[in-house]
Amino acid sequence: EIYTLSLHDALPIYELDIRQQQNLDRVKTAGYKAKTTTSVNYRTGPGASYKKAGTYSKGKVIRIVSKKNGWGKMSNGYYIYLYYTKKL
């Protein structure tokens, strides 16, 4: 079987893709930049009981996209204790 798709049929899909990309761009740039004030661990969740995912050196610039109970969710999906950061 052969299906024919007109430009009119495809246009709503194309517009939806553009809107989705614009929404993703807004999420990526949401929040604020901060700098670590000391060497600090970042974790898989918002609390010291969550698994350590890594360590940032003093002076590392990060993007905080949301905050919860003193913890900041970074643009990479990990969490950092905000006490050890300074908003830029």
Image (tube, rainbow, N blue to C red):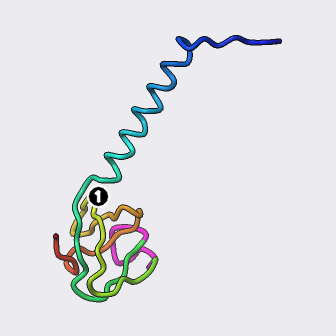
Q: Residues within 10 Å of mark 1 (few under 14, many from 20)?
A: some
24 to 20, vertically: above or below: below
- Give x and y (percent) for residue 29: 30, 53
7 to 86, vertically: above or below: above
Q: Is residue 44 left or right of residue 70?
A: right
What secondary structure is the magenta-colored segment mainly? loop
24 to 84, vertically: above or below: above
- Give x and y (percent) for residue 61: 28, 74
Report the front residue among 8 and 73: 8
* Magenta run includes residue 47: yes
Q: Which residue is mark 1?
A: 65
Q: Residue furthest right?
A: 1
- Give x and y (percent) for residue 16: 45, 27
* Magenta run includes residue 48: yes
Instruction: Name the amino acid type tagged 1.
Output: Val
77 to 48, vertically: above or below: above
Report the front residue among 11 and 74: 11
Quadrant position of residue 64? bottom left
- Give x and y (percent) for residue 11: 50, 18
State which region is magenta.
44-52
